[in-house]
Amino acid sequence: SINTLNALKTLVRRGDFVVMSIYIETTFRKMKNYKGENFWYTYYDDMRRTLGPDVKIVWVGYTPILNAMGIYAPMPGQKSPIYDNKKYNVNLRKEFNTVFKRKTTNDTNGFFLDFSNLLEDGNGNVGAYIPGTDTLLYYDTYHLTKRGAYFLWPFVCEWLDTNNITKN
């Protein structure tokens, strides 16, 4: 919301970085109702305008959706199957990733973190386990387990360092 952006503006200083993500089930629907169908473009621009050109913005790409079963149930006794709107969500995720990759390419302090290559096989499929292990990667179809997040952490740290995001 605009109030959230304005509050964030008061907290950041030149050289800071902000990490952003959009969640389809909440942020997407709210922003689409507020800003219209093409809010992807205006949301990025609003964020840049609000924070100013000297604040680094890291947009986190969507986690690839799990292509297999073998996942944790979110509540005891409940299965969390890959649900009906998977195709819709997959398309929205691809659109988000495409738009924000393009937007960050034209912004010297805009960055797009896409870690899908670490989770997918060469064909875009994602399994339930951390690659090369029998440790569960996903909690449900797109949330990582704690160990899944720990698996990504060294890669994220390296990416932040390579892109000079944590250096002033």
Image (spheres, rainbow, N blue to C red):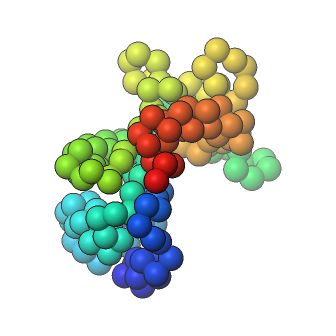
Query: Farthest bottom residue?
Result: 3
Q: Nearer the viewer, residue 68 or 57?
A: 57
Q: Where is residue 18 in the image (x, y as percent from the top left)?
A: 46, 61
Point 45% across, 34% down: residue: 162
Q: Quadrant of the N terminus?
A: bottom left
Point 46% across, 76% down: residue: 8
Query: Would residue 73 be found to the left or right of residue 38 on screen?
Result: right
Say if 127 sits above or below 138 in the image: above
Q: In which quarter of the image is residue 44?
A: bottom left
Residue 25 seen in render = no
Q: Which of 152 and 94 is in front in this view?
A: 152
Residue 106 seen in render = yes
Q: Where is residue 47 in the image (x, y as percent from the top left)?
A: 32, 68
Say if 112 sits above or below 71 in the image: below
Point 50% across, 26% down: residue: 118
Query: Would residue 142 be found to the left or right of residue 22 on screen?
Result: right
Q: Where is residue 153 in the image (x, y as percent from the top left)?
A: 62, 37
